[in-house]
């Protein structure tokens, strides 16, 4: 019989949500949003539709978060080799799964 031990990384639901949030690299997203809002304002000559701005910023946030998550998945094998990225969620997960 083969036994595997899987350790629990999260103690509660809030920690699970925080881990997913960290995958989106939230410190990078405001840079995208600032440049997007500024570009829209300049292109509209200062008369930007607020609903269009909100929808564009929300879509940009979701797209950037998804792209960052895919990047974490794609780079998980090389993240362990770098000290700065060694403790990312997918690096830890890929090393502890059987």
Image (cartoon, grey):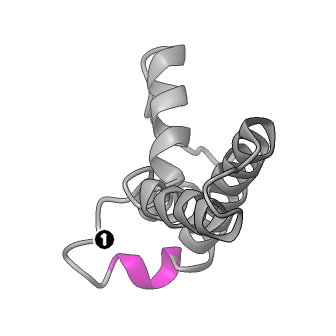
Q: Residues within 10 Å of mark 1 (few under 14, many from 20)?
A: some
| Quadrant of the snapshot with the C terminus | bottom right
Residue under numbered circle 1: 85
Span shown in magenta: 76-80
Instruction: Please say if 7 is above or below 39.
Output: above
Q: Residue at x 60, y 44 (%)?
A: 3
Q: Is residue 47 left or right of residue 4?
A: right
Q: Would you say the magenta stretch is mainly helix, strand or loop?
A: helix
Determine the residue located farthest toward the left in the rendered image.
Answer: 83
Front residue (pair 17, 58): 58
The image shows residue 10, relative to residue 57, as above or below, that is above
Secondary structure category for the residue under label 1: loop
Could you tell whether 65 is left or right of 29 in the image? Answer: right
The picture places residue 48, in percent across and down from the top left corner, at: 70, 50
Return the x and y of residue 12 as percentages of the image width and height: 47, 14
Residue 54 in the image: x percent, y percent?
71, 39
Residue drawn at 72 percent across, 37 percent down: 50
Of 2 and 11, the residue lying toward us? 11
Asked whether 74 or 68 is in front, the reply is: 68
Residue at the image position 44 percent from the left and 50 percent from the top: 26
Q: Indicate left or right for 21 with 41 as reference.
A: left
Q: Nearer the viewer, residue 56 or 81?
A: 56
- Image quarter of residue 11: top left
Q: Evaluate whether residue 49 shows in this view.
A: yes
Residue 83 in the image: above or below residue 20: below
Quarter of the view holding residue 72: bottom right
């Amino acid at each position: 019989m083969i036994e595997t031990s899987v350790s629990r990384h999260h103690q509660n639901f809030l920690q699970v949500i925080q881990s997913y949030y960290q995958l989106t690299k939230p410190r990078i997203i405001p840079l995208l949003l600032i440049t997007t809002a500024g570009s829209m304002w300049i292109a509209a000559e200062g008369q930007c539709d607020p609903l269009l701005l909100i929808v564009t910023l929300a879509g940009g946030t979701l797209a950037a978060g998804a792209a960052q998550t895919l990047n974490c998945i794609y780079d998980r094998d090389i993240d362990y080799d770098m000290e700065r990225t060694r403790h990312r969620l997918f690096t830890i997960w890929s090393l502890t799964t059987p």
